[in-house]
Amino acid sequence: MNGMRGSIILTLVILLSTGLQAQKNYTAEADNAYKSESFFTAVDLYKKAYTKEKKKSEKIRIIFRIGECYRLIENPELAEEWYLKAEKAQYGNEDPLLFLNLADVMRVQGQYTEAKKRYQEFANLMPDDKRGKLGVSACELSEKWLEKPNPYIIMNISQLNSKQYDYGPVATGRRADEIIFVSSRPGTIGSELDSRSGEAFSDLFTAEMDRKGKWSVPKPLPQPINTEYNEGPATVTKREGEMYYTHCPMEKNQSKGCEIWMAVKKGQDWAEPRKLSFFPDSVTVGHPSISKDDLTLFFASDAPGGKGGKDIWFVTMDKKSKEWSEPKNVAGINTPGDELFPFIHDNGSLYFSSNGHPGMGGLDIYKAEQIGKDEWGNPENVKPPINSSANDYSIFFMGESEKGYFTSNREGGKGGDDIYSFKMPPVIYTMSGTVKDVDCKSPISGATVKLIGTDGSSVEAVTDAQGAYKFDEKENGDRFIESNTSYTIVVSKTSSIRNIAVDCESKDYSKRGYLNGKGQETTVGIEKSTAFIHDFELQCSNCGEIKFKTVLYELAKWDLMVTPEVNSKDSLNDLYQTLIDNPNIVIELSAHTDARGSEESNQELSQKRAQSCVEYLISKGIEADRLVPKGYGEGHPLVVSANGVTTTYNEAFINSLKTKQEQEAAHQLNRRTVFSVLRDDYVPQPKAPEGQPEKESEGGTEGGAEDGGN
């Protein structure tokens, strides 16, 4: 009996020990898988370890590591979920890296506001680490870039993409109608899964485009190009006789680092590839890109001597020996982060992807200009829509055109990473705007907007109920607005009814006519698609007196006032332009005096003042029968309404002003000239020959003593 009891106790001890050992092994196995970058495997092991772990601090560490694994296998949603659990458990106080990595996965998802908070938290805890402040800056830049994206048209190439990873597109063929890219879709040679990603090992695939633009079903390149392990991005020489590509061998289920291999094409097949050795075998190299002359090869590597992470390097080929030079680091673009997927454009610009420069999230694509022999620098983010908050990389341009392909795992894809096309759309111009009443600020419907081009074109549009007009696309697909053309816009609306009441409150503007509005726009020198906005505010032409810049006079004089401070001719020049823009109107020029002097002398003086304006306009070329001078003497003092208060500048008001200077200024305001439209059916006479000298208006003389008419 006692022996049996002892056996049971011993059995329990063994089972308990086994359980403890299993718990310990899960954590150790997970840590080992994590260190060997088998993140997909490590996730499951960490989750099992979490259920067994009793120690709170260790459970929190495991939570953080699960978030790390999801981040590293490009699953930002689940990474954020586990990071937030670690943040709630205050793991960030122990390891501030939590805040940085949480901010990164938030930024990858476009959550810039929340990401900025975590970057700032990291910066507060780690003030000497620049990544926090750089992250805040990157979020702010991204928000700014998204407000004004570049005009590229982006399309998912669904015929090439699968639910797995598809990336690294390279166009080949004489018409760029063939493509080579990387994919982990079904049909790859390897039968095992990559423990890092959980996907099949990737191979190089190819597809062809028919004359209708449809892609064939992608098929893998044959062996010996593809192997049971990962093949990565390729580049093809211009004569398409050689291909350089990335090969990533495995040893005992662990990555050995990637290599660049080169294969020569023989007929429709590829000869046995050979490895290019630029560094010791322990150094990772990949993502090759060959220059237009086939003599410079760019690639990414973590070789010693770089800026940190993975850098862009290049080698050059000696034409005689056909040997590659020693690798050189492209120092002007590399950072302590990762620079990957270089592409050398035919124009010499170097494109690459990076997480070390300020970007929108994950990898962004950058462009660096060639600044000297074998030197590139001043990298610039290519901005949206090519870049997004997700990973954007591996860009390829077709020749020197503004179109090509790139890779992204942005939302809306088919799955994993997808291949996208981009192209710069044709330059398109549009013109639109609104037409409103200048006093009431209400829309004017039924106004005619005429567009006259220097190319001889002339088209019209009519404003809608909101006073809006637009010149966009014609019915046949042509455009109203063409390149390298200047346009005059004339807006008009007439009415046969005269002297209607001014009433903005009634909102009944159907009886109103308006002075023409006029504007200018040009597409000369504008190479980007532009939506011109040209709004107009029109002056009612049949609502009584129309204000324009004040025409002032010296005391008791009727000639136009011209001093360093006041030039009444400038005011009349504005009226002259109104008459030119409205060639069918006949106007009355109404002149007024102040109340000093007799009514008779003031009446005479005002008539002469009106006549002086008419004579000046006639001297500028305006027909005399379009101008009716009318003097009103002192009978119509100025009335000003402001902020709900109406003030009449009569003698009582002027005498109430405190200073002589204020009183004199008020008298001068009464010495004014305004105009009103009498009719708008005038038929212009043929213009006089050009080149005639401008007739100067005759100056007036004093109309009596200073206490006479004013």
Image: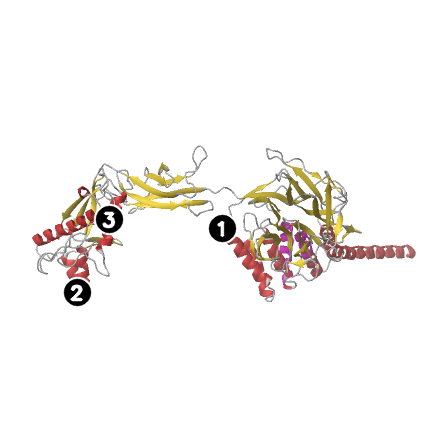
Element at badge 3? Answer: helix
Q: Are marks 1 and 3 in contact (CB under 8 Å)?
A: no
User: Any mark on residue 147, and which?
Assistant: 1
Q: Residue at x 23, y 57 (%)?
A: 567
Can you say whether 583 is above or below 68 in the image? above
Q: Quick one: 57 or 140, which is closer to the camera?
A: 140
Magenta stretch, main secondary structure, is helix
On the image, the x and y values in percent for residue 427 come to 48, 43
* Precedes in sequence: disc 3 or disc 2: 3
* Precedes in sequence: disc 1 or disc 2: 1
Residue beneath disc 3? 575
Q: Quick one: 606 or 378, which is closer to the camera?
A: 378
463 sits to left or right of 92: left
Element at badge 1? Answer: helix
Disc 1 and disc 2: Cα gap in Å?
A: 57 Å
Residue depth check, mark 3 versus mark 2: number of the one nearer the observer:
3
Disc 3 and disc 2: Cα gap in Å?
A: 32 Å
Residue depth check, mark 1 versus mark 3: number of the one nearer the observer:
3
Residue beneath disc 2? 660
Element at badge 2? Answer: helix
Q: Residue at x 16, y 51 (%)?
A: 612
